[in-house]
């Protein structure tokens, strides 16, 4: 296969192309579609078209597909997803009051509508079809299925009612089908979140946000109803390490500080002497710490560019705060010994005795990937598939990208770069002959026969667009961007499956 020298210029984006549904697939100028330095472009030759399968339709899956399609003019990419609906954590993980982050869906939609790309939802790889069967049908298989579980605290009382994982709570208010029946108890005044990352701040913000703000988002109707009845007015975010190690970013912190009706409660003692410690710190860490110091030390009546007037916050009905250098040791039940919910439930950190009374405990200490199929190597300790630049160790033709490749860290732009790296490995292996495309593969033609024999009905991208239209219509009636359908069976009925 002949390679074309040089690389595409920065800023190149998808142009107009005929969509799969017959419509016009409009080009979207986006900084996410540039060609990173060092990436080459391979043109198709007279050889059979490479067939590539991507498992998972979140950012990792779509960015992998996008890069392969953009840089190989002959490749055909099929994307498999276990849910009927695509986009993974962009749909189910991004906070409902952060709609701008979800704009990447426009670019993903454009990719899915390309003639050389196909989407097959409602297919669980490892159950409906095995990885071995996919490898028989495709020249290359890329596993991009993300992190479908959460890390556990590993402390007594973690399984009491009133204790939830951040992943489940986020899934609940974002309409993830498996979490639609969570029904968290919000009848307490104080909630405790274990973790100092952006997800922890997202949860705190949702718990304390005025309903008038949430009503304008795509938060699910049942979550909005539960939050309308919530008695939570205080949220503590507890972390093992100190202020210099917090994992959240300044944007999310600023949002919390300026949240209407809520005031920050930061202990000035936690920030004593930090000005000197951050003198040589990287600029993002320095600015973040300076904002925390400013917030902690601000006197009533003062006002800064980034922090709203403390005098206004002093009368705020709700509050939140950060607690450092504390590790939860045990969650204690109520006096009757049955429940962890209610204000008498306590999370007990280590160190000198300190008890924090709360009625809701949310563990936000990270997500975790799970093994997909016995035939795929998996490092259970690290929660990743062992790989080198996305090439799965010991299994030629099998690749991975995203969180299952590197662990559940980073933001969407991190996943984009990681996925481009894996896609580049696929392209290089096609160029040098590691992937033998001389023998044609049937792709979905073969997989479709297997699925039919097992009574599995795939959902196409045009099917998803019908679900999408229905959600948007329901949202419009309620004054929201969309009202998510949370029951997969309702989704399938809507499209006639």
Image (cartoon, grey):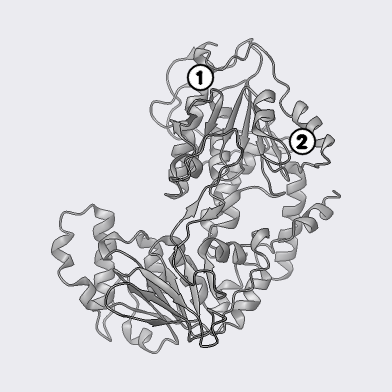
Q: Is residue 131 above or below residue 406?
A: above
Residue 429 marker: 1
Q: Residues within 10 Å of mark 1 (few under 14, many from 20)?
A: some
Left or right: 264 with respect to 87? left
Residue 43 marker: none
Which picture quadrant has residue 15? top right
Q: Position of residue 495 (x, y in %)?
A: 82, 50
* Residue bearing the label numbered 2: 22
Q: Is residue 314 above or below residue 285?
A: below
Q: Nearer the viewer, residue 148 or 340?
A: 340
Mark 2: secondary structure? loop
Mark 1: secondary structure? helix
> Of label 2 and label 1, which has the lower sequence position?
2
Contact flag, marks 2 and 1 (Cβ < 8 Å): no
Which picture quadrant has residue 450? top right
Residue 14 visible to the viewer: no
Quadrant in which the N terminus is drawn: top right
Q: Position of residue 268 (x, y in %)?
A: 23, 77
Which picture quadrant has residue 474? bottom right
Q: Mark 2 vs mark 1: give the one in front.
A: 1
Q: Position of residue 380 (x, y in %)?
A: 48, 44
Q: Position of residue 400 (x, y in %)?
A: 52, 35
Residue at 13%, 63% in the rendered image? 276
Q: Is residue 155 above or below residue 284?
A: below
Left or right: 48 with respect to 231? right
Q: Nearer the viewer, residue 160 or 467?
A: 160
Measured in 3D between alpha carbons, the distance from the residue under mark 2 to the one under mark 1, in whole angstroms, is 33 Å
Work out which residue is located at the far right of the displayed protein and give it. Answer: 496
Q: Residues within 10 Å of mark 2 (few under 14, many from 20)?
A: few
């Amino acid at each position: 296969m002949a390679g074309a020298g040089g690389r595409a210029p920065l800023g190149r984006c998808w142009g107009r192309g005929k969509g799969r549904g017959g419509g016009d697939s409009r080009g979207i100028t986006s900084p996410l579609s540039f060609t990173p330095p060092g990436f080459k472009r391979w043109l198709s030759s007279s050889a059979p078209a490479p067939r590539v399968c991507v498992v998972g339709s979140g950012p990792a899956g779509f960015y992998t597909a996008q890069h392969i399609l953009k840089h190989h003019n002959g490749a055909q990419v099929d994307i498999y997803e276990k849910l009927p609906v695509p986009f993974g954590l962009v749909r189910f993980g991004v906070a409902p009051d952060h709609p701008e982050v979800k704009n990447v869906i426009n670019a993903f939609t454009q990719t899915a509508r390309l003639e050389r790309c196909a989407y097959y939802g409602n297919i669980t790889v490892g159950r409906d079809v095995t990885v071995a069967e996919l490898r028989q049908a495709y020249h290359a298989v890329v596993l991009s299925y993300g992190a479908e579980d959460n890390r556990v605290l590993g402390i007594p009382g973690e399984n009491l009612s009133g204790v939830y994982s951040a992943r489940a709570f986020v899934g609940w208010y974002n309409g993830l089908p498996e979490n639609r029946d969570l029904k968290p108890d919000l009848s307490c005044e104080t909630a405790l979140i274990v973790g100092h990352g952006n997800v922890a701040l997202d949860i705190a913000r949702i718990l304390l946000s005025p309903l008038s703000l949430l009503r304008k988002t795509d938060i699910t109707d049942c979550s909005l109803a539960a939050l309308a009845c919530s008695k939570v007015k205080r949220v503590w975010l507890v972390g093992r390490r100190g202020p210099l190690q917090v994992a959240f970013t300044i944007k999310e912190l600023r949002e919390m500080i300026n949240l209407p009706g809520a005031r920050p409660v930061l202990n000035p003692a936690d920030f004593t002497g930090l000005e000197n410690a951050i003198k040589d710190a990287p600029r993002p860490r320095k600015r973040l710490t300076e904002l925390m110091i400013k917030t902690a030390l601000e006197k009533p009546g003062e006002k800064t560019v980034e922090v709203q007037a403390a005098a206004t916050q002093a009368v705020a009905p709700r509050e939140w705060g950060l607690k450092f250098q504390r590790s939860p040791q045990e969650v204690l039940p109520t006096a009757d010994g049955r429940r962890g919910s209610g204000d008498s439930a306590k999370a007990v950190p280590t160190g000198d005795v300190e008890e924090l009374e709360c009625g809701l405990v949310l563990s936000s200490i990270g997500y975790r990937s799970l093994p997909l199929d016995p035939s795929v190597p998996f490092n259970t300790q690290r929660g990743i598939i062992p790989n080198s630049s996305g090439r799965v160790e010991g299994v030629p033709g099998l690749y991975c990208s995203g969180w299952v490749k590197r662990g559940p860290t980073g933001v969407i732009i991190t996943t984009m770069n990681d996925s481009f790296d894996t896609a580049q490995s696929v392209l290089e292996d096609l160029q040098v002959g590691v992937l033998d495309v001389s023998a044609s593969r049937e792709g979905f033609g073969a997989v479709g026969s297997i699925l039919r024999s097992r009574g599995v009905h795939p959902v196409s991208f045009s099917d998803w667009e019908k679900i999408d239209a229905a959600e948007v219509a329901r949202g419009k009636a309620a004054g929201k961007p969309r009202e998510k359908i949370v029951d997969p069976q309702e989704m399938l009925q809507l499209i006639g499956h």
